[in-house]
Image (cartoon, rainbow, N blue to C red):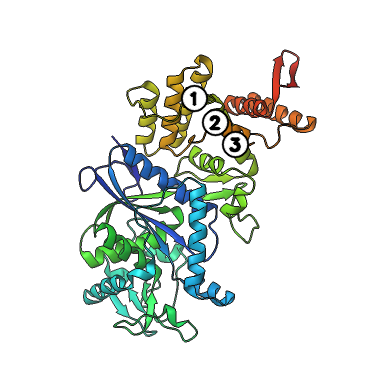
Amino acid sequence: MLNIHNTLTRRKDVFTPIEPGKVRMYVCGMTVYDFCHLGHARVMVVFDMVARWLRASGFDVTYVRNITDIDDKIIRRAQENGETIRALTDRFITAMHEDADALGVLRPDHEPRATEYVGRMQSIIARLTEKGLAYVADSRDVCFAVRKFEGYGKLSGKSLDELRAGERVDIAEDKRDPLDFVLWKRAREDEPEEVKWASPWGAGRPGWHIECSAMSSDLLGDHFDIHGGGQDLQFPHHENEIAQSEGAHGHAFVNYWMHNGFVRVDDEKMSKSLGNFFTIRDVLKAFDPEVVRFFILRAHYRSALNYSDAHLQDARSALTRLYTALRGAPPAAEVDWNEAHAQRFKAAMDDDFNTPEAVAVLFELANQVNRSGSVAMAAQLRALAGVLGLLGRDADAFLKAGVGVADAALDAAAIEARIAARAAAKKARDFALADGIRAELLVGGVVLEDSPSGTTWRRA
């Protein structure tokens, strides 16, 4: 029985799909004006994992992840570059796909572009206007009247007054309330013609929030199962989606809301101003893509993810240990779900996609394979890891590629540094890391020999 932590109810709820056996899931995707960063990587990998587990659980999944291809930042960047909006967005959509493919992220079933759904956005805005939930401001923008929607704030868990006092909002004198948000932006003279659409309210373009309501309802219906995205979108974006969608259609919008945690860099918030901002491409210059995917999945999706080179190196060592157990193992087979490790793996994943516990099961299996040499357990290890999109490569090819150790001919100083790190890990009782360092060095042709007087090493 799958349980999902539902942001809307603030508890783990038993997952019951609207239509038995089928799951409809929408995830907020990228605004394509630059290369994807680590935060995007986490969203892509996390919800790829969710979709994979739902399918492994027997559900027929329709997964939609949108592309925002019209936005103030997009317009500004295109003007700075002297190129069309379409040329800019096409280029970064291609780059996004390259990054996602490298991370082993399967393509969603639908990947709608916002510019293809402007007509549907206008129909929802018209319905909201007819119901008195939207109004034309003095600026000729169309705004949503937040205080006319009963229940605004239920996703964030805050009252209207708390939201107004505690959140940054786009305050404009022509709004009736600072919390009101724009549904349709009137055309500005300095904006290119390609971002101006005719409408009942004059030429203009959609606001950001209405885009997702239009795309999700068109592809999944007005009421669907799961809506996901980064924690930063909970308010105001997802709160506003609920208001405009439920306001327009008069019934529940989404049953389960899922939000993944923030990415931090060396325990600080990732930001360009702090100089600790990393694109996926930056990271992949130093680390294998599967190592990055493994690093993301080792943490629970709702927890903060702290990026550092040390943590990526640790993930590399741990993944090397798993691949070492698969040397000479057969290709992936079907999971034997009646086997004890698989049962524990399933229990972990059914508990709000608890990947840290599921990964721990993989290491239990690896230890058993190393002790027994069981081909059946090696096959089970590869099959279970495959559910998470891991361990799909030939083990020897992975290890020889130098993913564990960059150069087999490590110098003495580098070897002694890794031995010191292993000793520190053992002192901290982090035996998984200690074993991973041993395996990493072994792949690099270095054998460790422990004795009461300390650890020595030799070339294999």
Q: Which residue is mark 2?
A: 395
Relative to 343, residue 188 above or below = below
From the image, tell me which residue sits under label 3: 316
Residue located at (50% from left, 24% from top): 366
* Tally of numbered tags: 3
Q: Which mark is residue 423?
A: none
Q: Residue 242 vs residue 421: left or right?
A: left
Question: Mark 3 or mark 1: which comes first in sequence?
Answer: 3
Residue at point 36%, 62% (across, down): 112
Tag 1, which secondary structure?
A: loop
Residue 129: in sight, yes or no?
A: yes
Q: CA distance from mark 3 to mark 1?
A: 20 Å
Outermost right residue: 412
Which residue occupies the foreground of this view, 234 or 190? 190
The vertical placement of 133 against 435, above or below, is below
The numbered mark, 2 or 3, whose residue comes first in the sequence reads 3
Q: Residues within 10 Å of mark 3 (few under 14, many from 20)?
A: many
Residue contact at pointers 1 and 2, CB within 8 angstroms? yes
Label 1 – label 2 distance at C-alpha: 8 Å
Q: Earlier in the sequence, mark 1 or mark 2?
A: 1
Disc 1: which residue? 329
Badge 1: how crowded within 10 Å, few (<14), some, or many (20+)? many
The quarter of the displayed image where residue 165 is located = bottom left
Considering the image in quadrants, where does the N terminus appear?
Answer: top left
